[in-house]
Image (cartoon, helix red, strand yellow):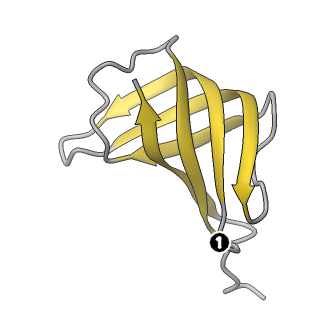
Amino acid sequence: MANVSAAPNESILIGRVIRLEKQANGKTEMQLKVEDVECIYGPCFSEKDQEITCFTFQNTKYVIIGSRIKAKVEYIGGPHNGQYQLLNIEE
């Protein structure tokens, strides 16, 4: 079962940015404190008050530490190692 991937999933979450690291390749990694989450389809891998590490390739020039963001998110990976990808951050 080590190679099992997460089921297709998508959620909308609202969270507070507590860490932000913009990389030269256009990728931004951030740590979010989840304030609210709504599952759109598939299993929901995050929950209120959880801190999650996520990434995006979307433009994040308006995102700063302390920002409250709303984003579509997908958990990709397996049961022991995965990542949250922000697919659409609302400005």
Front-lying residue, 44 or 33: 44
Residue 2 pos. (x, y %): 72, 84
* Residue furthest left in the image: 24
* Residue furthest top in the image: 66
**How many numbered tags mark residues here?**
1
Locate the C terminus and report the quarter of the image it occupies: top left
**Which residue is drawn at the image coordinates 61% and 62% (left, top)?**
82
Front-lying residue, 22 or 58: 58
Q: Quadrant of residue 24?
A: top left
Decide if residue 65 is on the left or right side of residue 21: right
Binning the other alpha carbons within 10 Å of mark 1 as few (below 14), some (14 to 19) or many (20 upward) gives few
SS for dot 1: loop
Locate the N terminus and report the quarter of the image it occupies: bottom right
Decide if residue 41 is on the left or right side of residue 16: right
**Which residue is drawn at the image coordinates 55% and 29% (left, top)?**
70
Residue 88 pos. (x, y %): 44, 43
Q: Quadrant of residue 7?
A: bottom right
Q: Is residue 66 above or below residue 5?
A: above
**Which residue is drawn at the image coordinates 53% and 44% (left, top)?**
54
Q: Is residue 55 above or below residue 20?
A: below
* Residue furthest front in the image: 40
Front-lying residue, 39 or 1: 39
Q: Which residue is mark 1?
A: 8
Give the residue type at disc 1.
Pro
Decide if residue 24 is on the left or right side of residue 5: left
Q: Quadrant of residue 60?
A: top left
